[in-house]
Amino acid sequence: MDSAPGSGSPHFHLRGGELCCEGVALPSLVEQFGSPLYVYSAATVRERVARLRAAFGERAHLCYAVKANPNLHLLRLLHDLGCGFDLVSGGELERLRAASLPTARSVFAGVGKEPWEIDAAVAAGILFFNVESPHELPLLAAAGARGGRAVQVALRLNPDVDAGTHAYISTGKDENKFGVAIDRAGAIVDAIVADPWLELVGYHVHLGSQLQTAAPYAAALARVTAFVDQDPRRAEGVRYYDLGGGFGIGYGRGEELDVEAVAQAVQPQLAARGWTPVIEPGRYLLGDAGILVTTVLGEKAQGKARFLLVDAAMNDLLRPALYQAEHPIVAVAPRADADEVEVDVVGPVCETSDFLGRGRRLPRCRAGDLLAVLAAGAYGASMASNYNTRRRPAEVLVDGDQVRRIRRRETFAQLFENEVEA
Ligand code: LLP
């Protein structure tokens, strides 16, 4: 069984000249569910959860970052694998409700929480809030007082550590809006400790996304412990250290982050303090578990470039346009005799930034051929939009030989129903 070149998951593999997801050939899925199409592999998600469990141990709280891919069926799968959730909006909390999932093992971060979101999450009885701004404290305390129970909070510190990642997905530097700068955090801890309706249970950091080394995690923990050790009140009652997410994957070029190394860099300190690790992986669990299948519409040469026009676009997968992200792209059924050509793979949207990959060597394609954009399971469907009045793709979950459609493709009527009835 050959893994698809560039895939971070062995479950996307070539069989009989066709790319398959687990036991199912992709062309048959497109026939059934249309194109473009998001396809996810359940086995990949299971393996990633197991890898994190092996690295961080059974005691660690694994809170899947819902924003990476909030599909209700994927949330259920992750819940069944023992995950809680990292939420950043009242909408994500509503998703847990819609999926009939418990909220007691979820944490809620967010740099600008609204009063109704705080009230809803307190009422839902989440594990703790990651407080990022002083404005939240009176709202949290009032919600606690109304419910007659102190609200558990972790303070999100901004440790001013460089995550070495794309500027748009770096969050732990002091020029970023996230968390509370350490030199201002003492006063906020004081305010939490002084309020009978708030209970300080931990500290949170999240340095950014797609980190490649363990060093920033270690550096952040060192800054947090230095802060805590300045005043015994900062440690009182503290039992969680939420080290955030950000575990990087390979995208066909690099290695994925060594999660064992991250665990080893933080575990001894956490164990010595009796702090339970909380992790919030998104991309690491879902990124390599999903692909976007797209159909070739045609080809055109212009200037020095040769454009391969496909039916998926920046509205379906925004990462290349927004972050200059490079996702591996492979032919689903490469013809043995096709020569390779260098192409820009572009979609139909009216923007020059609408590309899925530039300067890619691919077997020469004809209209109707299928391509797969790999490592698209995280921040693919979740960031898709209706730009150019395009319907977001259907999504399917493959588990062995079983196929389940987990999201229908939108209809045009759905796209404008709120305007018709405005
Ligand atoms: N925890 C917090 C507080 C976060 O803000 C994030 C991601 C995560 C956990 C999960 O990070 P992950 O493990 O997935 O790296 N749209 C961008 C990524 C933005 C990430 C935002 N926060 C992308 O497509 O690369």
Image: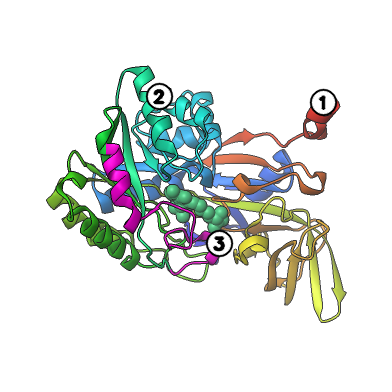
Q: Which residues are magenta?
A: 164-192
Q: Quadrant of the C terminus?
A: top right
- Residue at the left extreme of this rendering: 272
Number of numbered markers: 3
Q: Which residue is located at x 71 percent, y 66 percent? A: 335
Q: Amino acid at mark 1?
A: Ala
Residue at image mark 2: 143
- Residue at the bottom extreme of this rendering: 304
**Secondary structure found at label 3:** helix
Residue at image mark 1: 422
Q: Does mark 2 have its CB less than 8 Å from ligand 1?
A: no
**Looking at the rendering, which quadrant does residue 126 occupy?**
top left
Residue at image mark 3: 168
**Looking at the rendering, which quadrant does residue 360 occupy?**
bottom right
**Left or right of residue 125, residue 3 in this image:** right
**Secondary structure found at label 1:** loop
The Cα–Cα distance between marks 3 and 2, rounded to whole angstroms, is 33 Å
Q: Which residue is located at x 41 percent, y 49 percent? A: 281
Answer with mark 3 or mark 2, whichever residue precedes in sequence: 2
**Left or right of residue 90, residue 372 in this image:** right
Q: Which residue is located at x 68 percent, y 64 percent? A: 334
